[in-house]
Image (cartoon, helix red, strand yellow):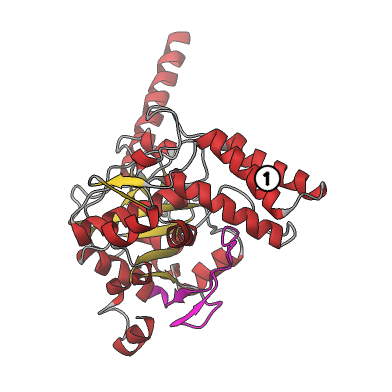
Amino acid sequence: MKRLWILFFLMLLVGCFSIDSYFNNRNEIIPPAEISYLVPHTTPICQGQTNTCWDFATLSLLESEVLRTTGQAFRFSPMWVVYYTFLEKTKNYLAQDGKARLAGGGLSEDVFLVVRNYGLVRYEDYPGRSNDDEEYNHRKMDQLIKNSVDQQRTEGLSTDEIIQNVQKILIENMGIPPVRIVVDSREISPQEFVEKVLKLNLSDYIQVTSFLSMPFYTFGELEIMDNWQHYDRYFNVPLDVFVAIIPNALKNGYSLTIDMDLTEKGYQTRRSVAALTPKWLSADSITQEMREKLFLGKMTSDDHLQHLVGYAPGAPDENWYYIKDTLSSSHRSATKGYIYMREDYLKMKVLSYLVNKAALKGIVNDSVFSQVL
């Protein structure tokens, strides 16, 4: 009798596993086998233990843009941007009497601020770490800068003295940034590198968003924590236009830097997919109003920036996007630094994106488009 009970129990157990396997297979999200439109881009690299996704993702877009416009392949230095962004953040923090953000996070516009004011250098000019195998880790540095600035403010040190002390911390952790670099056997400044070699025109790019808090087809500020500059040139468009611009960009050779939320269960780094599953939203409920509700309710937040480089068209709600990522977890996945994102997730969870203005042509009304240019 005891043997019969054991046998019955084992059969039940096997049956349960079979049922689970059946439902898991039915609910499995299958990314596309092929990316139809893929923008040339540099290979993914890992941001390590830093809050610098914004930096890596935006520089990756600029690398693709330089490759598109000049045919030259460069790897830019993310730590160059970190160094000068921290100086600018510290100045702002002091000017705001400590009522501003002073941390490692940021946005694409922080990269543009550095490029405009300080130029750019290549990774080999300023790697910001001892060797290529060393993982970036800014946890102690970020906290040390914040604590040091707060302490020195209470001690009454001048702005110049505090900035100099921040520079010391940055140099101790990342090294001294170069004043001049050698490109094609010629010594030039980082600003000359941008203007004469890269030929980057930052006015060619636009931030696009889609929320009801500002009128459509106007510019405004996206009120998120990392927008410490209070950048107010986000171009606001209806949700259907917001989504339509993305494949149009990729089909025409333009990639995008996306700012998005990765907190949903459907964002599965281990499996390299992002989709709204289990389906907590039906297709009918993926609306402008729902998107707004999730943002205002803090269920959609400014978590992570990535470089969107590819597109695979499919059936309605089954379009897929190919994302270059910098998170350590992403680099431990089978795709080694890439994520497949289904359009439902993008529609609800991407707050904004940076793209070349030319990508809007044909999607945004010509009269409106001329105002953007």
Residue 284 quadrant: bottom left
Q: Measured along the vertical axis of the image, is residue 345 above or below residue 171? A: below
From the viewer's perspective, tell me whether residue 167 is left or right of residue 28.
right
Judged from the image, the secondary structure of the residue bearing numbered disc 1 is helix
- Percent from the top left, x then y, of residue 215? 51, 83
Residue type indicated by callout 1: Lys
Q: Nearer the viewer, residue 152 or 287?
A: 152
How packed is label 1: few (under 14 Cα within 10 Å), some, or many (20 or more)? some
From the viewer's perspective, tell me whether residue 190 is left or right of residue 318.
right
Q: Residue at x 48, y 9 (%)?
A: 2
Q: Residue at x 39, y 64 (%)?
A: 354
Q: In what quadrant of the picture does the C terminus appear?
A: bottom left
Query: Which residues are drawn in magenta?
Result: 212-240
Q: Measured along the vertical axis of the image, is residue 81 above or below residue 257? A: above
Furthest residue in direction right, as rendered: 155
What residue does disc 1 label? Answer: 146
Q: Nearer the viewer, residue 129 or 318?
A: 129
From the viewer's perspective, tell me whether residue 67 is left or right of residue 323.
left
- Percent from the top left, x then y, of residue 263? 51, 49
Q: Is residue 227 magenta?
A: yes
Q: Can residue 341 be seen from the camera position used here?
A: no
Q: Is residue 175 magenta?
A: no
Furthest residue in direction bottom, as rendered: 367
Q: Label the magenta part by its dominant secondary structure.
A: loop
Instruction: Count every numbered label the image shows and give the total.
Output: 1
- Percent from the top left, x then y, of residue 355? 35, 66
Q: Can residue 95 be seen from the camera position used here?
A: yes
Q: Residue at x 50, y 68 (%)?
A: 291
Residue 314 quadrant: bottom left
Residue 214 quadrant: bottom right
Q: Residue at x 39, y 39 (%)?
A: 330
